[in-house]
Image (tube, helix red, strand yellow):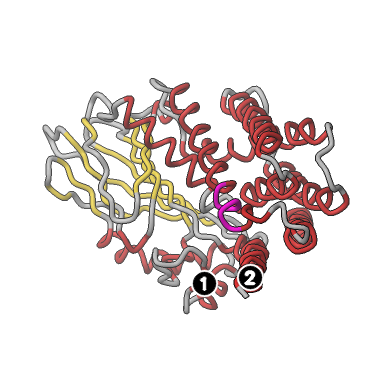
Amino acid sequence: MFNYVSRGLDRVRALLFIFLLALPLSAAAHTIRPAVVTVNFTSADDFTVTVRMSAELLLADIGSEYADTNDSPNAALYDEFRALPPEQLARLFDDFAPELLDELRMEFDGARVSLTYDRIEVAPIGDLELSRDSTIFLTGATPADADTMVWYWPEDYGSNVLRVASGDLSSAASAWLKKGQASDPYKLGSGAEQSWLSIVVNYIVIGFEHIVPKGLDHILFVVGLFLLCLKFGPLLWQVSAFTLAHTITLGLSIYGLVALPPSVVEPLIALSIAYVGIENIFTRELKPWRVVLVFLFGLLHGLGFAGVLSEIGLPESEFLTALIAFNVGVELGQLSVILGAFLLVGWFRNRPWYRQVVIIPGSLAIAVIGLYWTWERVLG
């Protein structure tokens, strides 16, 4: 009786695993990304603030309690705004701007200063299944003799990446701020008071969260690697090859030595996910060429990671430190995905039904999602 119940629970966990793999098919296109806020002290008296995010989220009042726009009761309103021409959406946002200014908070030496709304630049209508970013431009005056600045991002708006610079954006310091979290004090005139340890922690978090929970494509790729490997040794070889490859192209891309447009990189990443799923279905054991292919696919994924870092920026004074920390975060994210998959279905990977119940259905789900994303990113 006990064995019968145990086998039943094992199969339930396997089905739950397959269900979780299928979720990205509907969720990926509407995932809410953090805002990127850049504060630039252009002179001793003035500063600018640019916010890159989805203006539709603010207009539709979709708060930070939702990770996906489809989960909000205002999802239909968000989709309506998403379909508006840039000029029409900009006019609506101009009316919303006073509410935004009431929510934003910026302090110098503990005293709040006023921000002035300048304009918004809205991207053209593209794939309606994908979020489009707008850039909001704000200005302000630096109080005389001010020593430090602290930035507060409204909790309802979710997390944000804060970049602070003094004229030269290439030397901007970056920090990942959770929803409702205030920034560390930034000392005016000499840049941000950001320690080496703070930089390491910030970029490890950015790298980790780019995998879990925001990197659905990378998660599926790693799970695809996990499914075919019944032993940890070959799995670690593949993950190591993947990490080495994306570290190479990430570094080359950040240094400006390699560049490919997202319109090329993103479909190829989706195709790599589909390939791994398809190979798992038709192959019962790991082939020698798998590690080489994983390395080549890692080169592609590294170019995808580069897009994230190009938005956030790397501190010029600790460029290499931040780059390594980001890669460490990515690796920790990948290992956490493997650990999660093992805890869910790895316990019974030696059962005779494991391939029929877990590997084939799971790989099929990954292949379908990868092919769907490929089609969406090429033709959508």
The kind of residue tagged 2 is: Val
At x 22% / y 35%, what residue is drawn? Answer: 45
From what the image shows, is residue 29 above or below residue 268?
Answer: below
Look at the numbered discs 1 and 2 and tell me whether their residues touch, using CB distance below 8 Å: no
The kind of residue tagged 1 is: Tyr
At x 44% / y 69%, what residue is drawn? Answer: 92
Q: Is residue 185 left or right of residue 110?
A: right
Which quadrant: the C terminus?
bottom right
SS state under label 2: helix
Q: Is residue 347 left or right of residue 317?
A: right
- Assign the magenta stretch its main secondary structure: helix
User: Which residue does the numbered mark 1 point to in the structure image?
Assistant: 78
Is 110 or 41 nearer to us in this picture? 110
Tally of numbered discs? 2
One can see residue 1 in this view: yes
Which quadrant: the N terminus?
bottom right
Q: Residues within 10 Å of mark 2 (few under 14, many from 20)?
A: few
Boundaries of the magenta span = 339-344
Is 230 or 70 nearer to us in this picture? 230
Q: Nearer the viewer, mark 1 or mark 2?
A: 2
Is 94 or 21 nearer to us in this picture? 21
At x 53% / y 38%, what residue is drawn? Answer: 330
One can see residue 128 in this view: no
User: Which residue does the numbered mark 2 point to in the structure image?
Assistant: 12
SS state under label 1: helix
From what the image shows, is residue 169 above or below residue 366?
Answer: above
Is 83 or 264 nearer to us in this picture? 264
Q: Position of residue 39 (x, y in %)?
A: 34, 40
Mark 1 vs mark 2, CA separation in Å: 36 Å
